[in-house]
Amino acid sequence: MRLIVCGGTGYIGTALTQALLSRGDEVWIVTRKHPASVPYDTAMPHPRYVTWEEWSALPDRLGGMDGIVNLTGESINQRWTAKSKQRIVSSRTEAAYRLADIVGRMSSPPPVVVNASGISLYGHSGDQVYDELSPAMPADFLGATVVTWEAAIDRIPAKRLVKLRIGLVLSRIGGAFGLIRLPYRLFGGGRIGNGEQGLPWIHLQDMVALILFCLDNDSIAGPVNAVAPDPVSNDEFGRMLGKVTRRPHWFPVPGALLKLVLGEMSTLVLTGQRAMPKVALDHGFEFAFPQLEEALRDITR
């Protein structure tokens, strides 16, 4: 396949690009500017690069492609000031609007677009488990951001449009897992807040495999929950992390303290969702790490 990856330099995008290249696909990464050096072994297959401006000026420069994967978006792991919240929203919606404009001007647009989205649009849940048929009930800034984001994604004129509602991606390098594990390294791990909030997760290997599955499976369209089929609470996640790393899970962090330290960003860890990947399972996707214990053992070994 010949594929376009937007946001291909992040930790998910990098893993995806390597997976695509390893199976013999041609990869074009869309960036704000060309990299100073190519971070790949030049003796091996490597991606090509094009800037947004170059592609917009000549849309058919990337004609004849088989698909687009858009993972563009500024990190949410920062203090949510008015300016940072605006960047978080605009980085996502503007990329979708750009894609809508460029794809709309291509004489032979790719038939499928797989676009990142977020699991938080379902709102907050205790024991309730959401799937793709559950309605959007945004309850905080991040949930509202995802609703706005998906409205922008829907403007992309693709024959098949997939919206990957992504949870916490577990990997050895990159993402938020390092911060979650840090208290356990210091023997100070424990539940956060009341610990009952859901914590949707997925192993990076399964995240990449699910993107490939959506690209290759013509029957998949619309929302797809990119989470493992093992919905857990914050407390259950922490207890399992303590078990596999042989660290205590005993020191609870009061929600009031997190709100004081992190401000509005504290909703990232004080609220959450339990979700199931119904669409992926119904289409026969097989998770390499369907259970939390085996996923944590793999990334902490």
Image (cartoon, rainbow, N blue to C red):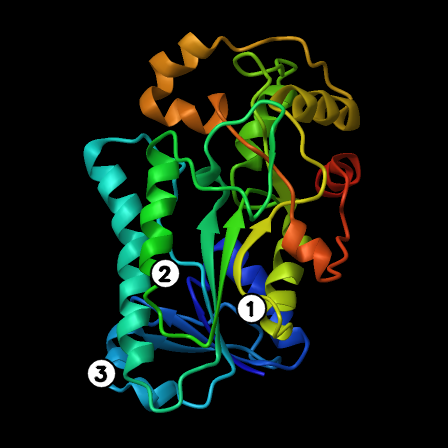
Q: Is residue 185 above or below residue 160?
A: above
Mark number, residue 153? 2
Q: Amino acid under label 2?
A: Ile
Q: Quadrant of the C terminus?
A: top right
Query: Image quarter for residue 81?
Result: top left
What residue is pinned by disc 3? 57
Q: Residue furthest left?
A: 83
Distance CA(mark 1)–CA(mark 3): 24 Å
Residue at (58%, 71%) from the top-left corner?
215
Q: Is residue 299 above or below residue 279?
A: above
Distance CA(mark 2)–CA(mark 3): 21 Å
Mark number, residue 17? 1
Circles 2 and 3: CB distance less than 8 Å?
Answer: no
Distance CA(mark 1)–CA(mark 2): 22 Å
Does residue 282 appear left or right of residue 117 in this picture? right
Judge whether residue 42 can be spotted in this image.
Answer: yes
Residue at (36%, 30%) from the top-left corner?
140
Does residue 260 appear left or right of residue 188 in this picture? left
> Residue 59 or 10: which is nearer the viewer?
59
Residue at (52%, 37%) from the top-left corner?
176
Residue density around tag 3, few if under 14, some if 14–19, many if 20 or more, within 10 Å: few
Query: Image quarter for residue 138?
Result: top left
Residue at (68%, 44%) from the top-left corner?
228
Whole-percent x and y of residue 173?
58, 46
Q: Amino acid under label 3?
A: Ala
Q: Amino acid under label 1?
A: Thr
Circles 1 and 3: CB distance less than 8 Å?
Answer: no
Instruction: Say whether disc 2 or disc 3 marks the residue closer to the N-terminus.
Output: 3
